[in-house]
Image (cartoon, helix red, strand yellow):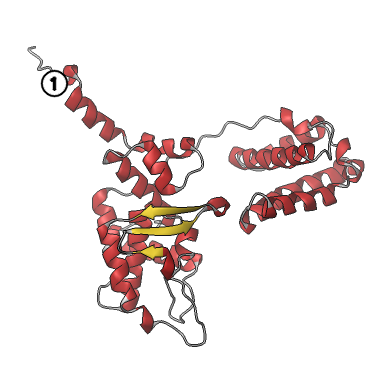
């Protein structure tokens, strides 16, 4: 099968069967387009039939990439290539899968950015409680920190997704997986107060049931939320580099410090893999130390020397 046609089939599979987001499909297509351009220069005949693409061609491509981009980027492109050829193999469009032998470079992942409890409180309390924008922004920050929501999940919330009586919100996460996320009393109260004045921003020409609205009455965009978090990060905690994902990390870290299990945090954040959640253990050693000092006899032994 022609390489370009194979990519078209793969994209359709991602969208319809895997329910991948448009952003994810675009990322896969971008990686495969880069592979196509490389093969066009080095092995143009391989583009006529995916059967002609061998392990040596793929390794040559990755070796070329490694001289230009980070190991994390190479690892992502390896994952895209593996997924593509695995799809072709399962659909019997390929007899032998050359990508099976590809190895991902080892990457050193940075620890998640997070705020301490006091800084988090200062950030979420930074918006004005007197203005409609301030009430909206307080609800926004409380949901990011109190619920650990992704910024895309927050931007996609509708009024009907919020159950104030139960203290939970229904979100659509990665892979279009739906989950119920509990939020605390502070977030519930912030959302309740915002909803009492949301009508002030509603536009007759832009009807929407989005929970968060901008000044024109349209749904608050992901980019706008990012800029607002950056603004309140600087205002409340002197952190002009703050981003929504840092508040999500903060939620997970504070849950872990408070005694929540990794499984509970995994459910809260909607992580597909527990390995992703386990990253938070590296920034929560203080909770382990407290448990040790309270429980282990050696920790309580008084030195006589």
Can residue 207 be seen here? yes
Circle 1 sits on which residue?
300
Up the image or down, 152 lies above or below 70; here it is below
Residue in the foreground of this view, choosing between 233 and 208: 208
Residue in the foreground of this view, choosing between 41 and 289: 289
Can residue 127 be seen here? no
Residue in the foreground of this view, choosing between 124 and 233: 124
Up the image or down, 247 lies above or below 197; here it is above
Q: Which residue is drawn at 29% across and 57% down?
A: 237
Image coords of residue 86 (percent x, y) = 73, 37
Assign the C terminus to one quadrant of the image.
Answer: top left
Left or right, residue 42 beside residue 124 = right
Image coords of residue 56 (percent x, y) = 81, 30
Q: Which residue is drawn at 23% across and 25% down?
A: 292
Image coords of residue 111 (percent x, y) = 42, 40
* Number of dots carrying numbers: 1
Residue in the foreground of this view, choosing between 242 and 148: 148
Left or right, residue 177 beside residue 268 = right
């Amino acid at each position: 099968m022609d390489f370009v046609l194979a990519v078209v089939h793969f994209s359709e599979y991602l969208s319809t069967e895997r329910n991948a987001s448009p952003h994810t499909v675009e990322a896969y297509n971008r990686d495969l387009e880069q592979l196509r351009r490389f093969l066009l220069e080095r092995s143009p005949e391989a583009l006529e039939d995916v059967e002609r693409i061998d392990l040596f061609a793929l390794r040559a491509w990755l070796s070329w990439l490694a001289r230009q981009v980070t190991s994390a980027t190479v690892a992502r492109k390896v994952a895209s290539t593996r997924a593509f050829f695995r799809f072709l193999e399962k659909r019997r469009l390929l007899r032998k899968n050359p990508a099976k032998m590809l190895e991902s470079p080892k990457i050193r992942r940075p620890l998640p950015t997070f705020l301490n409890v006091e800084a988090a409180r200062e950030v979420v309390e930074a918006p004005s409680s007197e203005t409609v924008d301030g009430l909206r922004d307080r609800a926004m920050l409380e949901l990011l920190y109190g619920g650990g929501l992704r910024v895309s999940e927050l931007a996609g919330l509708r009024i009907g997704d919020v159950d104030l009586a139960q203290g939970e919100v229904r979100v659509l996460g990665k892979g279009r997986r739906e989950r119920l996320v509990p939020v605390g009393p502070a977030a519930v109260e912030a959302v309740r107060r915002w909803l009492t004045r949301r009508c002030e921003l509603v536009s007759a020409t832009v009807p929407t049931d989005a929970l968060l609205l901008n000044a024109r009455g349209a749904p608050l965009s992901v980019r706008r939320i990012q800029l607002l978090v950056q603004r309140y990060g600087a205002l409340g905690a002197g952190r002009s580099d703050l981003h929504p994902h840092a508040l999500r990390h903060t939620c997970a870290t504070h849950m872990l410090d408070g005694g929540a299990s990794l499984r509970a945090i995994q459910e809260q954040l909607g992580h597909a893999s527990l390995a992703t959640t386990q990253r938070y253990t590296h920034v929560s050693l203080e909770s382990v130390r407290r448990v040790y000092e309270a429980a282990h006899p050696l920790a309580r032994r008084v030195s006589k020397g």
